[in-house]
Amino acid sequence: MKPQARRASVVGGGWSGLACALRLADAGIAVTLHEAAPQLGGRARRVDVALGDRRFPLDNGQHLLVGAYDRTQALLARIGSAHSAMRRLPFQLRYRDGFSLCAARLPAPWHLLFGTLAAKGLSAAERWSLVQWTLRWRLRGWRIQADCPASALFEATPRTLVQRLWEPLCLAALNVRLSQASARILLNVLRDTIGGTADAADFLIPCHDLGKLVPDAAAQALAAQGAHVRCGERIERLARHAAGWQLQSTRARTDADAVVLALPPNRAADLVEGAGTASDVCKALRALDYAPIATVYLRYGAPLALEHVVHPLREDRQQQRFGQWVFDRGALDPRHASILSVVVSGAGPHLELDHTELAGCVAEQLKAELGTPAPAAHAIIVEKRATIVPSPGLQRPAARVGHRLYLAGDAADSPYPSTLEGSVRAGEAAADALLQDLR
């Protein structure tokens, strides 16, 4: 039976909070969603970016999803954003110097096996090494007994494969380098992508800005279910009372039978600590570390289009070549013609440069690798706390924090890194825990 006349407050309007609120509303819970910012979306939202004499609706960071992200795709379908919202491409790594590794259009696992055999820029020994590595971990169920740095998984792997395949994929999926990443978490992602169905490793690239993709449509879906969405409302304090919880915001007080905190770890810890509960949870939340992401937008004066929608780049920090992936925004949305977005994941010396210097370095890298001209304008967005560092042995609190108090978002325990998929899964897990407790 669906619970009757139950009230839940979801604090945080990022993708995790939205996924949580929708799941609760669909189950008949009276939901209030509180978001401190003036708009929904959290760290995956639309921003108006000035590029020269024009402003464009772009994103606070370029995102790449994969076919294995089934909960994100289910969320898109739920809110009506599933069809034209994403460009789907078979798994492909196409460097402009001729190296390429692309999935064949065959059932799994033959799609990657034949793709490896047809790869360009790899020797026969390197191809065989890749096949052996994949088969070995497939037979092990993609499980490791004791967690360790992900770089240990590739100690016997040819350097070319590490540089051209595994390091770029780790940066794209976990936002840190192999040496910083949890082997267990990386294997979880690889299990679901290259170890999954033929389409699980597909690239899914948003064609619209991220605000249109999820937050705008999710807000409409929540309104249709009678939920209340309050933007610009920061929750300052939680207090337990006999009937449940009282939330004190900058504008009003709200009573709820249950509360979900879909917040960054430090903000969640502040509220949990202020409520006088779960000191061990607060300690775990404050121990989490963050990794940044920089997105460099370049607009060109003359018409410009890349050969493919997305290209990996040859990173060389000593040569100040910081870009790791480049996306042709015009191939995704005609309004963004002649705009490229370049992703620089993780920490590094690029963060010590000012925006003009970093844009210059990236523009020179693209000129050397892709033959692009000098851009007419640039803009850079740096999310300093974009994701949690998925370090070996990472410990995140479970969804249940206290009596009818729950945790979602990057801060909550998950087999996934703090990607969009991980956020959606954590939001739904918190909702499921709440629904179970209210039965």
Image (cartoon, rainbow, N blue to C red):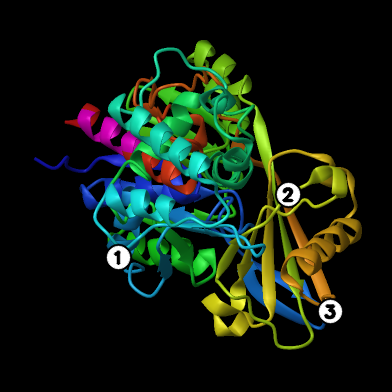
**In the image, residue 7 lies at what x, y percent?**
31, 41
**In the image, residue 394 lies at what x, y percent?**
52, 21
From this view, report whether residue 88 is shown above or below residue 133: below
Residue denoted by label 3: 376
Give the alpha-carbon distance from disc 3 to disc 1, as whole Å.
44 Å
Q: Which mark is residue 315?
A: 2
Residue placed at 73% from the left, 54% from the top? 323
Q: In this orientation, does residue 363 appear?
A: yes
Residue denoted by label 1: 224
Of all residues, the one furthest to the bottom in this rendering is 302
Segment colored magenta: 429-436
Q: In this orientation, does residue 351 appear?
A: no
Please tell me which residue lies in front, 272 or 253: 272
Label 3 element class: loop
In the rendered structure, the answer to whether residue 110 lies left or right of residue 338 reads left
Label 1 element class: helix
